[in-house]
Image (cartoon, grey):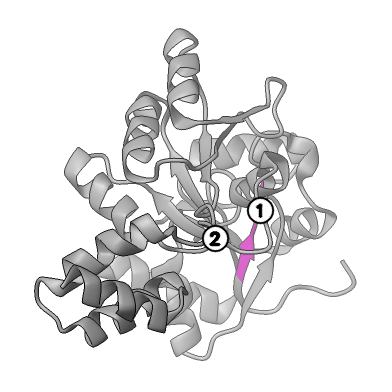
Amino acid sequence: MDKPLGPGLYIVATPIGNLGDITLRAIETLRGVALVACEDTRVTGRLLSHLGIKARLLRHDDHADARAHEALLERIAAEPVALVSDAGTPLISDPGYRLVREARARGLNVTTIPGPSAMVAAITLAGLPSDRFLFAGFLPAKAKARAEVLAELAGVPATLVFYETSPRLIEALEAIGQALPGREVAVARELTKLFEECHSGPPAELAAHYTAHPPRGEIVLLVGPPVPKGPATMAEAEAMLRAELSHAKPSQAAATVARTTGLDRKALYARAMELK
């Protein structure tokens, strides 16, 4: 390191499995800070020991009480402090949001040292469209809430990315099959580790596979974007017209169905008059 680190908060990404993925800048930063704030001192302690770094550790997360939170902010104002999670990039479904937001509000120096992220690794591996994606964190554990979230995201024209736990994977796949039929799904697990794998296919097939082979480890669940539909057939348009005619005039019904299907409004109006 060319010069000592100044006071501030340094957000440091750490490996998600393979320790070789730590960046040179992350190592330099962890060596140069006065304190490392982390989720679990045992987990971070093992990483630092592997790197040959001796640093003072402090357990801190978004649920820390007001006094502990304020004390850490005072440390950040006075000396360099690193923020790490157990694995990957802090704040990505991991603690840190509250601390970063408050540090920025106080005008303190906040710097990010990017690196491994399970979400990004899974997107590159899954073979699903990656030009647009939505990361939605963990799916709810309860069936009703999970179904509501999937229904809310059903129309998003992008690959959906979730984190999931091994015990809940089968339920999540079954819920996706019901809420998002016809979508390709990928299950990425043990990323960067010895038994890394990524299986893709229909949700039902994946659920059957993982029922026969119960998974372990961290999981990233990806769902392909909505499948574009071809032009509506006249039979489909006629069914829409009948529904619209129950409460609208033929001209209004034809206009509504034309907007929905892209079919010719005049032809739809003529058919609506026949049906009326």
Which residue is labeled 1 in the image?
129
Left or right of 192 on screen, residue 225: left
Total residue callouts: 2
Q: Check the picture and name the quadrant holding the N terminus.
A: bottom right
| Region of the chain picked out in magenta, as a range | 10-14
Q: Residue furthest left?
A: 247
- The quarter of the picture where residue 50 lies is top right
Which amino acid does the dot numbered 1 rest on? Pro
Which residue is labeled 2 in the image?
158
- The quarter of the picture where residue 126 lies is top right
- Residue at point 19% right, 72% down? 244
Q: Is residue 112 above or below residue 217?
A: below
Q: In this view, does 96 lie above or below 251?
A: above
Left or right of 192 on screen, residue 138: left
Other residues around mark 2 within 10 Å, as few (<14) / some (14–19) / many (≥20): many
Give yes or no for contact between labels 1 and 2 (Cβ–Cβ under 8 Å). yes
- The quarter of the picture where residue 186 lies is top right
Other residues around mark 1 within 10 Å, as few (<14) / some (14–19) / many (≥20): some
Of residues 104 and 242, the one nearer the viewer is: 242
- Residue at point 70% right, 43% down? 127
Left or right of 179 on screen, residue 253: left
Provide the secondary structure element on which disc 2 rests.
loop
C-alpha distance separating marks 1 and 2? 8 Å
Q: Which of marks 1 and 2 is nearer the N terminus?
A: 1
Residue 271 on the magenta span: no
Provide the secondary structure element on which disc 1 rests.
loop
Q: Check the picture and name the quadrant holding the C terminus.
A: bottom left
Q: Is residue 243 above or below residue 254?
A: above
Left or right of 68 on screen, residue 129: right
Magenta portion: prevailing SS class: strand
- Residue at point 26% right, 39% down? 141
